[in-house]
Image (cartoon, helix red, strand yellow):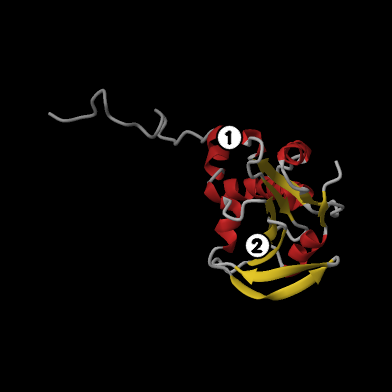
């Protein structure tokens, strides 16, 4: 014997009419995927504009950490057995990003090496090294294997121009057993600017 049981589905009421759909269900049916995308689009555009504005305000300097090289320079000058050389009077667009010396471990008469790194106005690297040890790692790493390409006169001093094994320009000069070096990914013009600023440290 068959017939509707307790689990049978009914789509009509006892009068045989389909019950009306509630307004809540009608609104839910209208909220399909397309409507949701159209509703969210203005919010997405606003978020993108905010991100772009923040990036514009931040500029390319985000993440650049500058340092004060004075303590390293003063320590090197105090321990070195030679007249220390440093770049002086560089434009503020040349920002110091690193400075280190091995003078802290140097005994009397030991060689002293000073290194200073700059971020140039063109957002490239320029490194300066001075040492009375020609075999010091910062010098050897650049000059060993480098090919000399002539010389250039900068601020009254003659600097040898070389091309390193990495293809970068190196400007260096040696006098009285002291070697000064400027090198890096910066353009030749910016490297020459740093080299031209090299002068005896006056403290």
Q: Assess disc 1: are there few (<14), some (14-19) or many (≥20) residues with their C-alpha within 10 Å of its C-alpha.
A: few
Please count the marks in the image: 2
Residue farthest top in this picture: 6
In the rendering, which numbered label is found on residue 85? none
N-terminal-most mark, 2 or 1: 1
Instruction: Look at the image and tell me whether residue 174 can be seen.
Output: yes
In this figure, which residue is indicated by the disc labeled 2?
185
Is 139 located above or below residue 5 in the figure? below
**x and y, in percent, of residue 94 in the image:** 79, 53
Q: Assess disc 2: are there few (<14), some (14-19) or many (≥20) residues with their C-alpha within 10 Å of its C-alpha.
A: some
Q: Residue at x 80, y 71 (%)?
A: 153
Left or right of residue 101: residue 70: right
Q: Residue at x 63, y 73 (%)?
A: 148
Is 189 located above or below residue 55 in the figure? below
In the depicted view, which residue is nearer to us: 177 or 148?
177
In the depicted view, which residue is nearer to us: 7 or 76?
76
Q: Give the foreground label among 2 and 1.
A: 2
> Marks 2/1: CA distance?
69 Å
Q: Residue at x 68, y 71 (%)?
A: 161
Residue farthest left in this picture: 1
Instruction: Look at the image and tell me whether residue 52 can be seen.
Output: no
Quarter containing the C terminus: top right
**x and y, in percent, of residue 192 in the image:** 77, 65
Quarter containing the N terminus: top left
In this figure, which residue is indicated by the disc labeled 1?
23
**x and y, in percent, of residue 48 in the image:** 68, 49
Left or right of residue 90: residue 75: left
Q: Residue at x 51, y 36 (%)?
A: 21
Q: Secondary structure at mark 1?
A: helix
**x and y, in percent, of residue 106 in the image:** 63, 37
């Amino acid at each position: 014997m068959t017939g509707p049981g307790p689990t049978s589905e009914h789509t009509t009421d006892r009068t045989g009419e389909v019950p009306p759909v509630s307004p809540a269900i009608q609104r839910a049916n209208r909220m399909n995927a397309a409507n949701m995308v159209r509703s969210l689009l203005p919010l997405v555009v606003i978020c993108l504009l905010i991100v772009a504005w923040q990036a514009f305000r931040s500029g390319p300097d985000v993440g650049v950490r500058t340092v004060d090289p004075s303590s390293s320079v003063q320590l090197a000058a105090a321990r070195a057995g030679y007249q220390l050389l440093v770049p002086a009077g560089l434009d503020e667009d040349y920002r110091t990003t690193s400075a280190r010396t091995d003078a802290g471990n140097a005994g009397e008469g030991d060689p002293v090496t000073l290194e200073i790194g700059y971020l140039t106005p063109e957002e490239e690297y320029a490194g300066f090294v001075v040492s009375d040890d020609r075999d010091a790692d910062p010098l050897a790493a650049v000059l060993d294997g480098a090919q000399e390409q002539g010389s250039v006169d900068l601020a009254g001093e003659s600097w040898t121009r070389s091309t390193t094994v990495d293809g970068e320009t190196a400007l260096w000069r040696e006098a009285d057993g002291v070697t000064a070096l400027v090198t890096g990914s910066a353009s030749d013009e910016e490297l020459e600017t740093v080299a031209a600023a090299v002068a005896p440290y006056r403290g």
